[in-house]
Image (tube, rainbow, N blue to C red):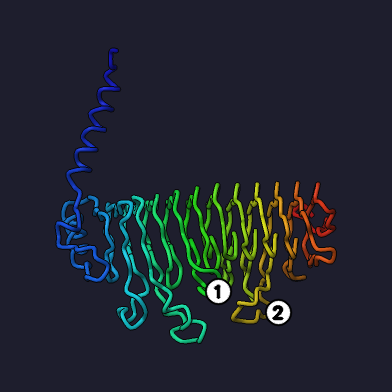
Amino acid sequence: MVLSLSNIFLFLLITISLSLSFANIYNIVDYGAVGDGTTNDTNAMLEAIQEVKQAGSGTVYVPEGVYLMWPFKMVSHMTLYLQPNAIIIAPSGPENWPLGVLYFIYGQNLENVTVEGGGVIDGQGAPWWPLYQNETFQNLRPSLIVFDSTNNIILRDITLTNSALFHFAPDRCNNIEVVNVTITAPPDPISHNTDGIDPQTCTNVHIRDCYISTGDDNVAVKTNTTNVLVENCIFGNGHGATIGSIGEEADQFVYNVTFRNIIFVNTTNGARIKISQGATQALVQNITFENLRMENVQNSLVINTEYNGGIRKRNILEPAPFVDDVVFENIISNNSQYPVAFTCISEGPCTNIKMTNINFLNLPSNAPVDCQYVYGVQDNVNPNISCLSTYPSKTD
């Protein structure tokens, strides 16, 4: 076989890239990590990260073992690689937690960061959860992985478990890829607010091939986030595929979001949009929920523009929230208690809602349907739930 010049050049580039990648691997054991689950291995992690920073790029390698660590920060052009059977565990409980630190793994103003490899990151959040239920340490629980103002993030082939609060919470980030990630925590109310993935003020987010079972939203696309695709996932315990909540401050929005090819099993909600009560100028637009399969989901389809988590009352002169262009298509829900709950308001109706090819199986004979100020079209909804009015629309 004769190789073309372009193929030879490509081969050389790949070879050089691989050589550089393997040259910049820093095994935390080489820096003193013990991995017995009780020794504090934080300094070994920090030294390895410092090597990556000095080299300009590299991989921090975590071999098989259980590594107790205090919160740490990643750097740009860094891969954190956890070998299968490698477990990083956080300190257990607030008495062992650094005061005022609201993350376990953190990065700010970074470029090109990856967490991957088949291992586990365990937040050991159980001691925190009852404190929240007792209204102690409320809003002070740490999230497991937090990136702020960071571009090009990859989470791949890892397990996140038992966070004290959210498991993965990127804020003001761009280009996020979450692939084949498992996220688990006990169901609500045991581990309330242990959301799986919560992008906020983010753009270009792709979540695929994940299993997420938690104590709150499986995935929640939060304020000022656009261009999100969540696909080919299984959602277990949790509050489902959620847009919001948004609207706790004025002029918040979410648009261009698709959830597709999702299986829901025992989630509280299936497809849900929630806007806080009293929201001003909140916009949710161009949202698609398609090819969904729900089993034992309490509330199948939900839009709520008066979500009771609201913290303010809207002045009558302030613009109301706006939900527009939402598609629910190719959905099968079995054993739901509440098939449709669309609660919008007169001063801010929900418009251009589309329901197509939806089958609710084994509904209770008296299953309630709530449709307030919601307008759009529906086709092939079984049983025939008369929910959507035909006015107003965009063209009126």
| Left or right of 319 in this view: 135 | left
Under mark 2, the amino acid is Ile
Residue 21: x and y in percent read 22, 43
Nearer mark to the viewer, of 1 and 2: 1
Query: Where residue 108 sits: x, y (%)?
Result: 33, 63
Residue type at mark 1 is: Glu
Vertical side of 49 occupied by 260: above or below:
above
- Going by the image, does 329 lie left or right of 37? right
For this orientation, the residue located farthest to the top is 1
Q: Secondary structure at mark 2?
A: loop
Q: Residue at x 45, y 49 (%)?
A: 180
Is residue 19 positioned above or below 140 on the image?
A: above
Q: Secondary structure at mark 1?
A: loop
Q: Quadrant of residue 76?
A: bottom left
Question: In which quarter of the view is residue 249 placed?
Answer: bottom right
| Image x and y of residue 311, in percent | 59, 81
Quarter of the image with the C terminus in it: bottom right
Q: Earlier in the sequence, mark 1 or mark 2?
A: 1
- Depth order, front residue of 157/109: 157
The front one of 375 and 241 is 241
How far separated are the C-alphas under marks 1 and 2?
A: 16 Å
Q: Can you give x and y, in whole percent of width and height, for residue 305 in the image?
A: 68, 69
User: Could one spot residue 211 in this view of the protein?
Assistant: yes
Q: Which residue is mark 1?
A: 249
Instruction: Please rate how many residues cluster around mark 1, counting C-alpha atoms within 10 Å: few if below 14, some from 14 to 19, many from 20.
Output: some
**Residue receiving disc 2:** 316
Q: Residues within 10 Å of mark 2 (few under 14, many from 20)?
A: few
Residue that appears at 67% across and 56% down? 295
Q: Residue at x 51, y 58 (%)?
A: 212
Q: Which residue occupies 32% across, 67% down?
A: 89
Q: How many marks?
A: 2
Residue 201, visible in the rendered structure: no
